[in-house]
Amino acid sequence: MINMIAAVAKNRAIGFENKLIYWLPNDLKRFKALTTGHTIVMGLNTYKSLPKGALPNRRNCVLTRSVKELPGCECFASWEEFAKSCKADEDVYIIGGASIYQQFIDKADRLCLTEIDDTPAAADTFFPDYSEGWHVVNREAHTKDERHDYEYAFVDYERTR
Ligand SMILES: NC(=O)c1ccc[n+]([C@@H]2O[C@H](COP(=O)([O-])OP(=O)(O)OC[C@H]3O[C@@H](n4cnc5c(N)ncnc54)[C@H](OP(=O)(O)O)[C@@H]3O)[C@@H](O)[C@H]2O)c1
């Protein structure tokens, strides 16, 4: 199964200057819970944005045409090359960034989004439009609290066939 996981603002903003826009501890917790033990695939910029490099206890795959080796990661020059390396029953989480979401959303079976009730003042990368062709299968809303400055919801979408 191919999943996409992202934290998106109301205008679908996901990043600014190669960093995440929001710091939401519960989103990071959910990201870890969903992806641990599985395969994550990311673009080179997203890899470079990770504070400690490859994420532990996951198969880290990086799409890049310019880099051949990265610590703790497998590098692939194309989606096709990556797909050939996967087992038939492998659970894959596409973790960004914008260029990877945009190119491969058509391959995803499920979107695991954290929808944040805010429009940021500055953003330079966006999640693709998912307003058509997807329906909500699960939604868990959260209010703001001392560790979360905005309301947010964990929303899972599947393809409408
Ligand atoms: N909010 C969220 O959930 C979330 C999640 C992840 C990332 N982000 C944000 O997204 C931003 C980064 O996104 P981005 O679009 O700039 O970068 P990106 O998608 O992470 O990486 C782009 C790079 O990936 C490689 N690449 C792209 N398509 C490829 C393909 N088809 N085959 C092989 N390699 C390919 C290229 O590297 P080469 O030049 O080496 O070929 C390209 O320069 C950051 O701000 C980050 O914080 C947000």
Image: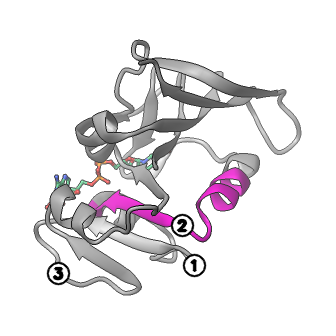
Instruction: Pick whichever of labels 2 and 1 is earlier in the sequence.
Output: 2
View extreme (front): residue:
88
User: Residue 54: x, y in percent?
Assistant: 46, 76
Mark 1 beta carbon near ligand 1 (under 8 Å): no
Mark 3 surroundings within 10 Å by alpha-carbon count, few (fewer than 14), some (14 through 19), many (20 or more): few
Residue beneath disc 3: 68
Q: With 112 as the anchor, is 43 left or right in this view?
A: left
- Callout 2 amino acid: His
Q: Secondary structure at mark 1?
A: loop
Q: Which residues are magenta?
A: 28-44
Residue at left 70%, top 51%? 30
In this picture, is 85 found above or below 33? Answer: below
Name the disc covering residue 56, or none.
1
Mark 2: few, some, or many residues within 10 Å (few <14, many ≥20)?
A: some
The mark closer to the camera, 2 or 1, is 2
Q: Residue furthest right?
A: 146
Residue to which mark 2 is pinned: 38
Distance CA(mark 3)–CA(mark 1): 20 Å
